[in-house]
Image (tube, rainbow, N blue to C red):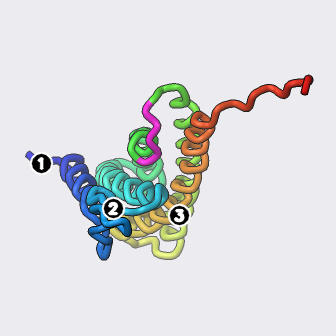
Amino acid sequence: MTTIRGIAGQALASALHRPAAGAPTVRPDGRPANPRRLVASPLGRELVVFAAIGVVSTAAYAALYLLLRTATGAAAANALALVATAVGNTAANRRLTFGVRDGRSMVRDQVGGLVALAVALAITTASVSLLGALAPQAGRFAELAVLIVANALATAARFVLLRSWIAADRKRALVPAPAPANAQE
């Protein structure tokens, strides 16, 4: 049986190994271009991987939301589904998007993920509450549609927060500490 995770992983691997549309097949110096590069910049690669993880996380969130919504209100189902997917989302982004593979800053990075979760929770809770006030008869799928749009906004905020939190930590680890100033010259 094929899982969502398996399909997303195959799609991500395929996308990362396919040259970008219109990408040159030969470098200016005549050597063949690297067909494994989708984008030329690290930011572009991060965005592609982040988006793929986001698709998988959103699918898991939507399934959990619909499941939890049968037993609880919209705000509670939203919060529980977000919390349940947040740790896995942060761990996947930490490793796959930002390339952090050691455990040194894992707790710090998860705290960054919790900050991003708080922002996402504020945006989605406000959205579903506004829907409830404007259209109290809206069904679960209307709620889910509003929440997916709100999650898209929250995802943009999450990318900026995680990139500044996790990637900045990674960059600090790569830069050697400056040598102490020598009093004698």
Q: Secondary structure at mark 1?
A: loop
Q: Secondary structure at mark 2?
A: loop
The answer to which of marks 2 and 3 sits earlier in the sequence is 2
Q: Which is more foreground, mark 2 or mark 1? A: 2
Residue occupied by mark 1? 2
Residue at 44% from the left image edge and 59% from the top image edge? 47
How far, Cα to Cα, is label 3 from label 1? 36 Å
Range shown magenta:
97-101
Residue found 43% across the figure and 33% down from its top: 101
Label 1 neighbour load within 10 Å: few <14, some 14-19, many 20+: few
In the foreground, 8 or 82: 8
Q: Is residue 143 magenta?
A: no
125 relative position to 172: left or right: left
Residue at label 3? 129
Q: Which mark is residue 38?
A: 2
Residue 52 place in picture, x, y as percent: 34, 56
Looking at the rendered image, the disc whose residue lies closer to the viewer, 3 or 1, is 1
